[in-house]
């Protein structure tokens, strides 16, 4: 009887050990997850960080050519090169939604309405020759901030206004 009792205790102990080991595994898994989050920390948005159109409001009527000014708060504009934390450059989209965080802003897709300002430009002149899609009528203009590798900071660093081209 005594032997059986000891055996049972040993079994329970073994089961506990296994559980502990499993829990530790899970913890390690969590740590790995947060490690991955750290590597994409350049797309983590802090309170107060945002982009905005300096001279456009939703529903505004404009005539081309129009100089549109890009604004950003809580981040710094720099030419595209390497992914520096809290730094990046503007992108202007025409009739396109935001690019998800850590996804690349489409390159060479100007005809689809994706424009990069990788030199760190703070404005651009809207003309029909550069923006042929800006035909008269209603269009959505979107600012999207992205890091030095053109990886989007996501919808939190994006804003949209509806404009009416006269
Ligand atoms: Cu870019």
Image: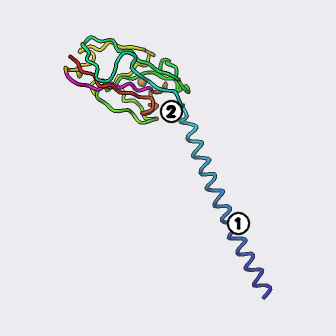
Res. 159 image quadrant: top left
Q: Which residue is mark 2?
A: 43
Q: Is residue 33 left or right of residue 118?
A: right
CB of mark 2 near ligand 1 (< 8 Å)? no
Say which element carries label 1: helix
Q: State the residue in front, 9 or 97.
A: 97
Q: Where ligand 1 lies, by image quadrant?
A: top left
Location of residue 164 in the rendering, given as x and y in whole percent from the top left corner: 24, 21
Question: Residue at the spot x=29%, y=14% of the render?
Answer: 126
Q: Which disc number belongs to residue 146?
A: none
Q: Secondary structure at mark 2?
A: helix
Residue at image position (67%, 66%) is: 18
> Quarter-wise, where is residue 161 in the image?
top left
Residue 12 image position (x, y, % from top left):
70, 74
- Within 10 angstroms of label 2, few (less than 14), some, or many (20 or more) residues? many
Q: Nearer the viewer, residue 84 or 156?
A: 156
């Amino acid at each position: 009887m005594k032997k059986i009792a000891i055996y049972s205790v040993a079994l329970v102990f073994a089961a506990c050990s296994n559980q502990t080991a499993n829990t530790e595994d899970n913890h390690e898994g969590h740590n790995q997850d947060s490690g991955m989050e750290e590597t994409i920390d350049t797309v983590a948005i802090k309170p107060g960080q945002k982009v905005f159109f300096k001279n456009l409001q939703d529903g505004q009527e404009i005539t081309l050519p129009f100089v549109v000014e890009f604004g950003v708060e809580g981040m710094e504009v720099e030419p595209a090169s390497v992914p520096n934390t809290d730094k990046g450059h503007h992108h202007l989209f025409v009739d396109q939604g935001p690019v998800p965080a850590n996804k690349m802003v489409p390159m060479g897709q100007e005809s689809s309405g994706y424009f990069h300002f990788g030199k760190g430009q703070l404005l651009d002149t809207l003309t029909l020759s550069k923006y042929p899609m800006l035909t008269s009528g209603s269009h959505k203009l979107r600012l999207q901030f992205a890091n030095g590798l053109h990886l989007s900071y996501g919808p939190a660093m994006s804003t949209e206004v509806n404009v009416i081209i006269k």
